[in-house]
Image: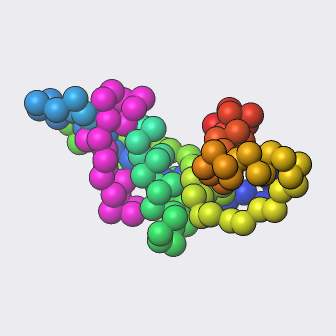
């Protein structure tokens, strides 16, 4: 975590609503009027974190809220914490131009065989960085 990371905390409400889907846990995120679902409670919490992170890519998030709403019958109320800065770093798919240096013979062979150098470099970096 960097010193300047933005971290938000919001309450979520989880309610088990069995139906015919594989996602019977309905999650409400009142502070951003969000809803998502999960396979179980742990998945529901993870989906809420992902929803908040995704929301932060498009909209301004409100200030953190540590106040838990009253749980109605059958509901679980908890807080979720999202490192918005980290989420944005991991999910920023904006393409940037990088200049690399390779031997000419590899460049020529790559062009002859139709290698997409950008795709190759992206895949190599993902493998090297385990992402």
Is residue 108 shown above or below 75? below
Q: Which residue of the protein is positioned furthest toward the left in this rendering?
A: 20
State left or right for residue 5 relative to residue 14: right
Query: Residue 122 location, x and y as percent?
Result: 66, 47
Q: Position of residue 125 (x, y in %)?
A: 72, 42
Residue lying at 59% horizontally and 64% vertically, measured from the top left: 94
Residue 48 image position (x, y, % from top left):
41, 46
- Relative to 97, is 77 above or below? above
Residue at image position (48%, 46%) is: 49
Q: Is residue 53 left or right of residue 37?
A: right
Left or right: 11 in relation to 66:
left
Q: In the image, is residue 42 part of the stretch drawn in magenta?
A: yes
Q: What colour scheme governs how the chains and residues are painted in the rendered image of this protein? A: rainbow
Asked whether residue 62 is in view, the answer is no
Magenta residues? 26-44
Residue 11 within the magenta-colored segment of the rendering: no
Q: Is residue 10 visible?
A: yes
Residue in the foreground of this view, choosing between 16 and 36: 36
Which residue is located at x 24 percent, y 33 percent? 23
Spot the residue most to the front: 112
- Quadrant of the image containing the C terminus: top right
Q: Residue 79, relative to residue 92: is it above or below?
A: above
The image shows residue 60, relative to residue 4, as above or below, that is below
Q: Residue at x 42, y 38 (%)?
A: 45
């Amino acid at each position: 975590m960097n010193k300047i990371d933005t971290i938000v905390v919001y309450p979520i409400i989880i309610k088990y609503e069995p139906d015919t889907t594989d996602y019977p846990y309905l999650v409400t995120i009142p502070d951003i009027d969000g809803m998502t679902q999960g396979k179980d409670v742990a998945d529901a919490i993870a989906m809420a974190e992902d929803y908040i992170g995704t929301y932060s890519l498009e909209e301004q998030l409100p200030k953190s809220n540590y106040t838990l709403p009253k749980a109605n019958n059958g509901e679980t109320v908890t807080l979720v914490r999202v490192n918005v800065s980290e989420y944005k770093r991991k999910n920023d798919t904006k393409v940037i131009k990088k200049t690399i240096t390779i031997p000419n013979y590899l460049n020529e062979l790559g062009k002859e065989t139709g290698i997409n150098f950008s795709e190759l470099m992206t895949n190599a970096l993902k493998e090297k960085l385990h992402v």
